[in-house]
Amino acid sequence: METVFETAIERFTVLSYFVIGLSHILQPRAWVQFFLNLREKGEAGIFVVAFLHLPLGLLIVSFHNVWTGIPAVVTVVGWANVRKGTLYFLFPAIGMKSLGRVRMERAHEFVIAGAVLMIVLSALVAYHKITS
Amino acid sequence: METAVQKMAVVWFFVVGLSHMIQPRAWAGFVVMLRSKGEPGALICETVCLGVGVLIVSFHQVWRGIPMVLTLFGWMQIAKALWYFTMPRASLRHMERVNENNTWLLMIPGRHLYRD
């Protein structure tokens, strides 16, 4: 039986990832420009990315510790955000290398990431909420 | 609920504190970047403080024992955000103290966060 907080975190994750995923699909070039701007700022830009990931991940894993069924996907996504935020805060060089791969001519990769990671994730969890 | 907030705060302070200690120059660069944006940069900084403070205070109202430190920290973050949101120039003056030659200034709060 899920608690009120777990359900709220699932709703929060679905809505956030749906909007961000759709934005990746509709505006991939804007996302590429966003990351190129951050890369220009060096390690300070990597901290901006870490500030976007660590709080989101911590919020999810602190209030949502479900390891069974479809909701486990939300927990895994939370830990993935914590891992990325931690790595970028402690070793920004890793983030620099990762952002180094972002190029305008590969903007279509953002469309794929948006569709696969975000829309599918939100659809899965939304399906679980409707059917349960 | 309180335990969840405490867990979140422990990981946050540990990671951010450790990062201040091992990457002080990167943090100095981050503060310099915010400062270069003028008052909007100060507002970004205070938005982070307000977010952390509101989250703690909303879900963690413990006024006894060691956990009370976290509640107080949450209220202090809100007070800081209120002060700097209404007087962003004060925030900029505070940021001006940080540059890449005195990164040790960032290591001291880092050590406190790390130990908390």
Image (spheres, coloured by chain):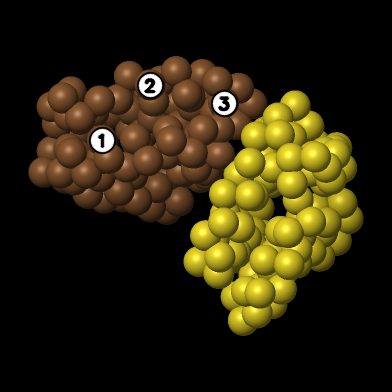
Chain colours: A brown, B yellow
A91 shown above or below B114: above
Residue A98 visible? The answer is: yes
In front: mark 2 or mark 3? 2
Q: Classify mark 2: helix, strand or loop.
A: loop
Q: CA distance from mark 2 to mark 1?
A: 11 Å
Tell me if mark 3 has few (under 14), some (14-19) or many (20+) residues whose alpha carbon lies within 10 angstroms of its own: many
Q: Classify mark 3: helix, strand or loop.
A: helix
Q: Classify mark 1: helix, strand or loop.
A: helix
Q: Which residue is mark 1?
A: A32
| Percent of width and height locating residue A32 | 26, 35
Q: Are marks 2 and 3 on the same chain?
A: yes
Tell me if mark 1 has few (under 14), some (14-19) or many (20+) residues whose alpha carbon lies within 10 angstroms of its own: many
The disc at residue B48 is none
The chain carrying label 3 is A
B18 shown above or below B47: above
Q: Are marks 2 and 1 on the same chain?
A: yes
User: Residue at horizontal 71%, vertical 73%?
Assistant: B90
Amino acid type, residue under disc 1 in the picture: Val
User: Residue at horizontal 61%, vertical 58%?
Assistant: B35
| Percent of width and height locating residue A127 | 16, 38
Q: Which residue is mark 2?
A: A100
Amino acid type, residue under disc 2 in the picture: Gly
Q: CA distance from mark 3 to mark 1?
A: 19 Å
Q: Are marks 3 and 1 on the same chain?
A: yes
Q: Which residue is mark 3?
A: A92
Name the quarter where the C terminus of chain A is drawn. top left
Instruction: Give the mark, 2 or 3, whose residue is nearer the N terminus.
Output: 3
